[in-house]
């Protein structure tokens, strides 16, 4: 039996100048196992593809007229080997994650300062050392930078509304993939 997708229309939030990310993540958190999300937005939410992809969802998008988009996020039924667990980049959960050697609080900074500060902090670490950063929101653009530089991370949206990320420094020359 197929579970119907949950529908979330964030167009009113966007048209009012708001940020719908927390509403989207709350809707995802409330999905039942095997349930997908049908999202309606005023643009094609490409950064969200990576965020929900890391949580096991595959997007299918189409323009529905007037500049509006429909994106259906369907849970991937069976993860194959090498697929990363939600909220993590890198090897499986059995990897050695050391206690962070440094913690930084970037919650009061405006973009792009949280990303710049986190990248600078992790670049000063030896391979395998970790850094914990508190950020004002989920760092979509930081994820790509960390991946490109060979670093790994684990993160989560905290109940207080900020994002906590632990970054493990990769080895020199881009790290393992």
Image (cartoon, rainbow, N blue to C red):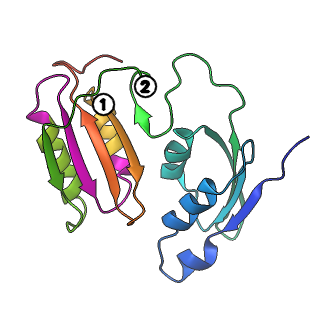
Q: Residue at x 19, y 37 (%)?
A: 100
Q: Which mark is residue 148?
A: 1
Quarter of the figure with the N terminus = top right
Q: Residue at x 36, y 18 (%)?
A: 177
Q: Nearer the viewer, residue 174 or 118?
A: 118
Q: Nearer the viewer, residue 49 or 4?
A: 4
* 56 sits left or right of 140 in the view: right
Q: Quadrant of residue 92?
A: top left
For disc 1, the neighbor class at 10 Å (few under 14, some 14 to 19, many from 20) is few
The part of the chain drawn in magenta is 123-141
Reply above or below: 115 against 170: below
For disc 2, the neighbor class at 10 Å (few under 14, some 14 to 19, many from 20) is few
Task: Tell which circle, 2 or 1, labels the residue nearer the N-terminal end.
Answer: 2
Q: Residue 51, position in %: x, y?
A: 49, 46
The residue at which mark 2 appears reads as 93
User: Which secondary structure, mark 1?
Assistant: helix
Q: Residue at x 75, y 58 (%)?
A: 6
How many numbered discs sit on the rendered protein? 2
């Amino acid at each position: 039996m197929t579970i119907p997708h949950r529908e979330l229309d964030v167009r009113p939030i966007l048209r009012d100048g708001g940020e719908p990310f927390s509403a989207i993540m709350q809707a995802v958190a409330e999905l039942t196992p095997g349930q997908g999300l049908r999202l309606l937005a005023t643009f094609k939410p490409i950064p969200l593809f990576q965020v929900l992809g890391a949580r096991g969802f595959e997007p299918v998008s189409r323009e529905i007229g007037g500049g509006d988009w429909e994106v259906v996020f369907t849970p991937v039924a069976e993860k194959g080997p090498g697929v990363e667990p939600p909220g993590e980049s890198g090897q499986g959960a059995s990897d050695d994650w050391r206690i962070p050697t440094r913690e930084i609080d970037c919650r009061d900074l405006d973009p792009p300062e949280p990303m710049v500060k986190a990248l600078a902090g992790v670049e000063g670490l030896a391979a395998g050392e970790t850094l914990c950063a508190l950020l004002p929101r989920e760092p979509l653009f930081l994820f790509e930078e960390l991946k490109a530089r060979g670093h790994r991370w684990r993160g989560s949206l905290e109940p207080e509304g900020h994002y906590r990320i632990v970054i493990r420094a990769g080895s020199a020359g881009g790290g393992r993939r």
